[in-house]
Image (tube, rainbow, N blue to C red):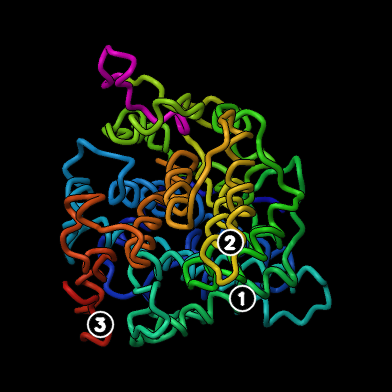
Amino acid sequence: MKIVYTSCTCLLLFLTQACELTEVTKLAPHHKLGEETVVTDIPSAEKLLSGAYYSLKDEAMANQMGIYTSLMGLNVVSTAVSGIAYTNNTVQTTDANINNYLYAGPYQLIQTANWVIDKTGALKVNDPRKIQIIAEARFLRALGHFYILRLFGEFWDVNSKFGVEIKDAPKLPVAPRSSVKASYDLILSDLDEAILNGKDYVKGSKKGYATKLAAKAIKAKVLLYKKDYSGAAILAKEVMAGPAELAGNFVDLFQKQKHMSDEVILSALVFATENSSGTGKNFYWINAGNFLSPRYTALLTNDARKAIIVRNFRDPADPSKWRGNGKFSVGVDGTNYDTEYYFRLAEAYLIYAEAEARRDGGVLTDALNVLNALRVKRGMTGVTAQDKTQLLALIRTEKELELGAESGEDWFDLVRYIKNGDVQPAVVKPSLQDAGKLILPIPQLSIDASNHIIAQNPGY
């Protein structure tokens, strides 16, 4: 399928809309492909689908999402004023970055996916690609809702009323937030459709598209968050079975192979923003004041993956104190524009290890063996654990070593471990004195525009 790229003008239009965001139904799809777009056949449906894929590589999802969630955790620090509230876990309801990126970005993805589902579903054709396009769009819609749920919803409690505002069709009026259970039900239903009717994963190709394997991988992750540990372990094991495979060289994965790596299951094809300052993941990490935290640098000291630490112009002369993020130090095709890794096979290993350790009747040796298989692949020796508590701690540390400073996964793991009673929030991060700040506030602009139909999260 050919991807249609847009100019910077479209992105600036989106950001202007996001800055004025009042409620999510008013988000216009990229490329102006939405209600006014005529879909008369499969090629025009493909064009509409390209607009949905664009959301995976725009400013909000591919760059700002990873930076701000990483700042909330333990692996990243920033010299930028806009990052201080995230580092200190004191984000306010009026924070512009929530409104512009963290809330608007996933809903932009959802909105464009809904137009694809609606208009492609209305086609009177027998082409099997019709079902496949809808399945891909439903995968993207599930991904968007999942991001909203784990950032803004009480995802750890299926009985909570603080789920997401579900958008399962275009042009829906503003509606109250659904329960966490209903939010999970929609996400899992969409992923099941993608598993059934999505495209096959193809080795040696660009990994920027929804596939059956990607749907299984994200579903395993969703089930882990939902605490369906048996289901998560089963699916993660299926994903581990292939055809994706762990990269042989950790540094080359990020600096050479990128979205062509067969370890990558879903990525953005390229970071899409292009302007005079060279905006991109490479620019933000190397030049714009985002650094690996001293804690994370110390954690990497004896790990073979420390090769991701590279110098940048703000780093001190002492090479032991370099803070640059080498995962994004080399842009795609020699540019400043880089990809976002939404899911790598390594994460399936870690999901399996945790789910197997947590599930009733789980075999701890199986979980440990999979954890060590990943470690050995990364050039490390195996670890041992005396009990479940120690094993879970090792798994969380391994996720930091493996996924740190990519997409903020250490933050989401921290929230889950806190809610499971594995760690005390203020012990692991002093700024987490208020347990109510484990999710972000809904933007006040959206709440006001909804006439307070949308409920704010407790504690804000």
Real-space Cα distance between discs 1 and 3? Answer: 28 Å
Asked if residue 113 can be seen in this view, the reply is no
Density class for disc 1 (Cα within 10 Å; few <14, some 14-19, many ≥20) is many
Magenta-colored stretch includes residue 382: no
- The three-letter amino acid code for the residue at tag 1 is Ile
Density class for disc 3 (Cα within 10 Å; few <14, some 14-19, many ≥20) is some
| Quadrant (top left, top right, bottom left, bottom right) of the C terminus | bottom left
- Label 1 sits on a secondary structure element that is helix
Residue stretch in magenta = 313-329
Magenta-colored stretch includes residue 316: yes
Tell me what residue is drawn at x 21 percent, y 69 percent: 436
Q: Whole-percent x and y of residue 138?
A: 60, 72
Q: Earlier in the sequence, mark 3 or mark 2?
A: 2
Q: Is residue 35 left or right of residue 317?
A: right
Query: Is 358 rendered above or below residue 372?
Result: below
Q: Is residue 155 left or right of residue 380?
A: left
- Front tag of 2 and 1: 2
Q: Which residue is mark 3?
A: 455
Asked if residue 140 can be seen in this view, the reply is yes
- The three-letter amino acid code for the residue at tag 3 is Ala
**Quarter of the view holding residue 15:** bottom left
Real-space Cα distance between discs 3 and 2? Answer: 36 Å
Q: Which residue is mark 2?
A: 356
